[in-house]
Amino acid sequence: MKTPENLKYGKTDEWIKLEGNIATIGISDYAQDQLSDIVYVEFNKDVDDVVKKDDILSTIESVKAAGDVVSPVSGKVIGVNKGLANKPELLNDDPYEKGWICTVEISNPAEYDTLMSAKEYETYCAGRH
């Protein structure tokens, strides 16, 4: 399982990369592995939508299951990876780069500080098997 050190992680398997006050959000390698072959991505939020922590950003469907991607932080959506609609498999192939879900201009930086480090997330995932 890949767990980049420069990212933070939520208990619902989202990752977040913070640059200034812009957060890029996606699903972890663990999450894509659990879902298996992802076949469809539906976006529940669009650019300029305001989101609260734990709001549903998108729904991902795979051959095994469907799952919601929730926002680990509050803020305003400033970008959505619409390319996933035509190539949902990017979430399996490259969850940390090409498979990002959206970008959010965060409004409460303290929420970011509550997320897990890569090491904490790996420990959390190991206890779930």
Image (tube, helix red, strand yellow):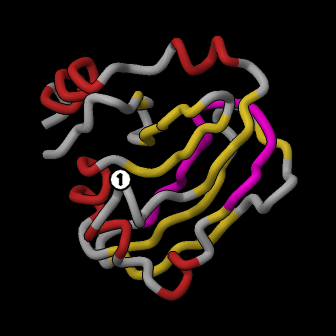
Q: Is residue 96 above or below residue 73?
A: below
- The residue sitting at 80% across, 59% down in the picture is 47
Is 87 on the left-hand or right-hand side of 24? left
Is 122 displayed left or right of 24 in the figure?
left
Q: Please, what is the dominant secondary structure of the magenta stretch?
A: strand
- Residue 89's spot in the image, x, y percent? 35, 77
Q: Pointer 1: residues within 10 angstroms few (<14), some, or many (20+)?
A: many
- Residue that protrudes farthest toward the bottom in the picture: 86
The image shows residue 16 at horizontal and vertical percentages of 48, 37
Residue 44 lies in quadrant: bottom right
* Displayed quadrant of residue 93: bottom left
> Which x, y percent locates residue 117?
33, 20
| Picture residue at 55% right of the left edge, 78% below the top | 83
Q: Is residue 76 magenta?
A: yes
Which residue is rendered at x = 38% and y = 20% of the image? 116
Locate the C terminus and report the quarter of the image it occupies.
top left
> Residue 22, located in which quarter of the rendered image?
top right
The range drawn in magenta is 66-79
**Residue 18 placement, left or right of 125:** right
Circle 1 SS class = loop
| Residue closer to the observer: 19 or 65 | 19
Residues 95 and 129: in front is: 95
Q: Is residue 83 magenta?
A: no
* Location of mark 1 (residue): 96
User: Quick check: 93 left or right of 99?
Assistant: left
Q: Against 109, is 100 above or below?
A: below
Which residue type does callout 1 highlight?
Answer: Tyr
